[in-house]
Image (cartoon, coloured by chain):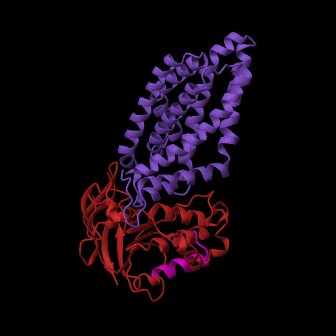
Amino acid sequence: MQRPASHVSAPPTTVAVDLVGVTRLFGTVPAVVRADLRVERGETVVLRGPNGAGKSTLLRIAATALSPTYGGGTVLGFDLLREREQIRARAELMTHSTRLYEDLTAAENLRLWCRLLGIGPEGIDAALDRVGMLEVAGERVRGFSQGMRQRVAIARVLLRAPELLLLDEPYTGLDSEARYAVDDLLRRAPSEGRTVVLATHHPAPQGLEHRTLHMDGGRIVREAP
Amino acid sequence: MSAVASPGRPGSFRQAAAILAKDLRIEVRGRHAAGTLLPFAATLLIAFGFAFGPGREVLERTAPGLLWMAVLFSAVMASRRAYQTETEDGALEGLLLAPIDKAAVFLGKAAAVTVELLALVVAVLVMVVALFDLSIGSPLPLVAAFALGVVGLAAVGSLFGVVAESARTREAVFPMLVLPLVTPVLIAGVRATDLAAAGRTSEAAQWLGLLLAFDVVFLSIGVLVFGYLMED
């Protein structure tokens, strides 16, 4: 039996992400080494570092897509290892994989998620309109560019309205319109009460208040304003 | 698996229905069954028909086995295809990270493969009756044999499809995992079909019982462990 995860009350906490001593090995190769990550609710944190620094792995651990080999912590007040479904009900991981079905239309992809998650479909048009994809809502994703796919993925995020947004290189392969959609999502996050952790090589959107952490060799090596 | 919907959150069966509808829509648009499975099954049957020659008795005796061979290999291909659509753009990870009952994903995918295979069985059965002159002595046990057998094949295929996705050599791993496990379905299906075609209903019922037990076991295993298999 599975408990309905979204109806378990979140523990009262001002900390959105609190990972302590997290290590992740792939075989014997360490991807993340004794990382501590603390993000306050409503805060935006940008992870920077060279390729292979461990940014993606750390995000995937926070999203419960990967388990830490050692260490643990909480996300939105829920235990990272024992309360995965509660975290998944409130967090969204966005990567350059858009998780769309190519033989479904943009609207059908969103309708599927509405049916799975029990969200009313009345917000689909508004979400697609906000990312500039309403005109092609009835077209199959197979014919979309990477930027158009990413905009549909952003529309899905808007429908779900997660408390925590984890973005892994969201600008990869995007056109200017899609980059604008990502920037808009980030800029609105604080006013919408959303916590954001973003791993990127790109500059953060202008005017976005954020904290930057640098990773290298699987470790968080320093914090910069 | 929770069958009761909580406020605002659909129950597991509604989630399974959403996965089923999605997979069937993708299948209809991709025309995989019509474009790949049916020609494959037809070629297999015609090739064996020529190999065995025009002798009616040999064709009648071998027809149940050939029919089930075609269904078995089509089931392997259909199950692989069901997961290929999930991995094209990371959709399977999306399902993993979604706050939904993972057993619903299993049931939805197994139901979609079952529907595809049942459509294929109808087409293949028509071909076998036409090519091999297979008589249909007792239609009801025959229908039950295919329905139960296809559910079992779809359950095993959907269960191990997700396991194979994590393997680098998934194309090779998947048949190696599935084919030994579905041997009971093949044996029971062939025997039940043979006996039903001969009108020996009560003897066919024993094999139908085996198919039913197989379905119950693998559907239960799938509901219980699918979520764990999806995890890292």
Image quarter in which the C terminus of chain A is found: bottom left
Chain B image colour: purple
Q: Is residue A31 magenta?
A: no
Q: Main secondary structure of the magenta part?
A: helix
Residue at 55 percent across and 25 percent down: it is B141
Front residue (pair B23, A45): B23
Front residue (pair B164, A31): B164
> Measured from the top left, where is residue A21 in percent x and y?
23, 64
As drawn, B92 above or below A40 = above
> Measured from the top left, where is residue B199 in percent x and y?
59, 17
Residue at 55 percent across and 15 percent down: it is B200
- Residue B38 quadrant: top right
Chain letter, colour red in render: A
Magenta region, residue range: A170-186
Instruction: Determine the residue located farthest toward the bottom in the rendered image.
Output: A207
Residue at 50 percent across and 41 percent down: it is B170
As drawn, A146 above or below A66 = below
The reply to whether residue A171 is in sight is no
> Measured from the top left, where is residue A179 in percent x and y?
56, 77
The reply to whether residue A106 is in sight is yes
> Measured from the top left, where is residue B74 in percent x and y?
60, 34
As drawn, A13 above or below A6 = below
Left or right: A224 as drawn, with respect to B195: left
